[in-house]
Structures are given as structure tokens and as C-alpha cells.
């Protein structure tokens, strides 16, 4: 795909997004696009990307600074900053798409698996919800997570942390 193709695809995508904003989602324009958001600029066609997948709710493109070649970023087209902001049905659709892209990466690149991750607030380089889908191979040098692991001092501490999290989850209002 050359620069002309990318520009045409982005113009076409922008027309579709404009139509959607003016009709189907007219009452949700505040979440459709956020000025100054890098990913919103990609969705609107103001910025280019190497798109690998697109449907009504999502767009997936190659990360410009990949962990490995084939590292894909999957975003909702509407602007949501964190996982908490994404409607359940949209989140379910995004993760179904992440599964499809993950399999596509394995087939296309001969990857042995993928690493699928979401940064929520901390380490979220672009404040627009996104899912990283990274091709993996045994011996690729990516060891577990990117930070040092910590151990619980003992089983009692581990149980106390478990209990506190369980209590907080139980206290959350069903939405």
C-alpha cells in the first residue's frame, strides 16, 4: 500500500465516521472524537496508519514503535480513555476482534503465540483505550512482564490481599 492508497483509505474512513457521527451516534458525539487524541486522529483520517483490520466499532493498525514486527494496536473508533469508560458490549466486541487478530498474526507471521495486553492509566502512552497484540516466539527475549516480580512475604499476606480485593469487587455497583 503506497501513500496514495493510505490517503484514499483515510479519506474514505473519514467520510464513514462523519456519516456515523451525524446520524447513528448523533447523541454521543462527545465520545466519538477527542481533539488532540492521536488515535482519534487516526480514526478520522487526520493521521495515517498501517491498518490491518477495521469494522464498525474498531480499528487495528501496526504499532509505530513495536516490541516485535507485527505488533498491532486495536482501538475502539469512539473515544474512551480507560477500560472503565468502554461500554460492555463494545468491550466484548473488541476482545472478540483481538482474538481474531491474534490468530491472524500467528498465521501471517508464523508466530508461536501472542501477548495480548491493556495498560489502564499507568503506562498508557495514549489516553484512548487500546489493546496491544504482540507476536511471540519461544526465545524471543520477552520474559514475562516488563517489570520485576515481587513475592508475598507469606501466605497470610497473600490471603489478606486477596480478601481486600474480593471485598472491593463485592462492593462495586453492578452497571
Image (cartoon, rainbow, N blue to C red):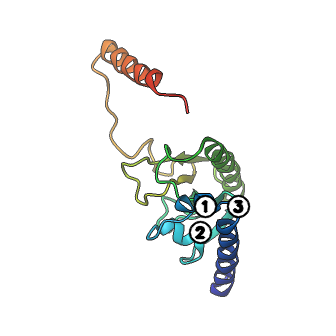
Element under disc 3: loop
Identify the residue at image location x=43%, y=47%: 120
Query: Viewed as shown, does residue 101 lie left or right of 152?
Result: right
Quarter of the image where one finds residue 19: bottom right
Question: Who is closer to the viewer here, 22 or 95?
Answer: 22
Name the one closer to the observer, 68 or 31: 31
- Residue sitting at x 72%, y 55%: 107
* Residue found 46% across the figure and 50% down from its top: 141
Q: Which circle's residue, 2 or 1, is located before the other in the chain?
A: 2
Comes first in the chain, label 3 or label 1: 3
Residue pointed to by mark 3: 24
- Residue 32: x and y, percent? 57, 62
The C terminus appears in which quarter of the rendering?
top right
Residue 77, labelled with which disc?
Answer: 1
Assess disc 2: are there few (<14), some (14-19) or many (≥20) residues with their C-alpha within 10 Å of its C-alpha.
many
In the rendered image of this protein, does residue 75 appear above or below residue 83?
A: below
Residue found at the very far front of the displayed protein? 27
Query: Residue 43, which numbered label?
Result: 2
Amino acid at each position: 500500500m503506497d501513500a496514495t492508497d493510505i490517503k484514499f483509505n483515510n479519506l474514505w474512513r473519514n467520510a464513514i465516521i462523519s456519516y456515523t457521527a451525524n446520524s447513528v451516534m448523533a447523541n454521543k458525539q462527545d465520545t466519538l472524537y477527542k481533539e488532540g487524541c492521536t488515535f482519534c486522529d487516526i480514526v478520522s483520517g487526520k493521521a495515517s496508519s498501517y491498518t490491518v483490520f477495521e469494522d464498525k466499532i474498531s480499528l487495528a493498525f501496526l504499532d509505530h514503535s513495536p516490541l516485535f514486527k507485527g505488533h498491532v494496536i486495536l482501538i475502539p473508533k469512539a473515544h474512551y480513555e480507560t477500560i472503565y469508560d468502554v461500554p460492555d458490549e463494545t468491550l466484548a466486541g473488541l476482545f472478540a476482534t483481538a482474538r481474531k487478530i491474534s490468530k491472524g498474526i500467528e498465521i501471517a507471521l508464523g508466530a508461536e503465540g501472542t501477548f495480548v495486553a491493556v495498560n489502564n492509566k499507568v503506562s498508557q502512552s495514549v489516553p484512548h483505550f487500546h489493546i496491544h497484540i504482540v507476536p511471540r516466539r519461544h526465545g524471543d527475549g520477552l520474559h514475562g512482564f516488563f517489570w520485576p516480580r515481587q513475592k508475598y512475604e507469606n501466605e497470610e499476606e497473600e490471603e489478606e490481599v486477596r480478601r481486600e480485593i474480593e471485598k472491593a469487587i463485592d462492593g462495586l455497583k453492578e452497571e
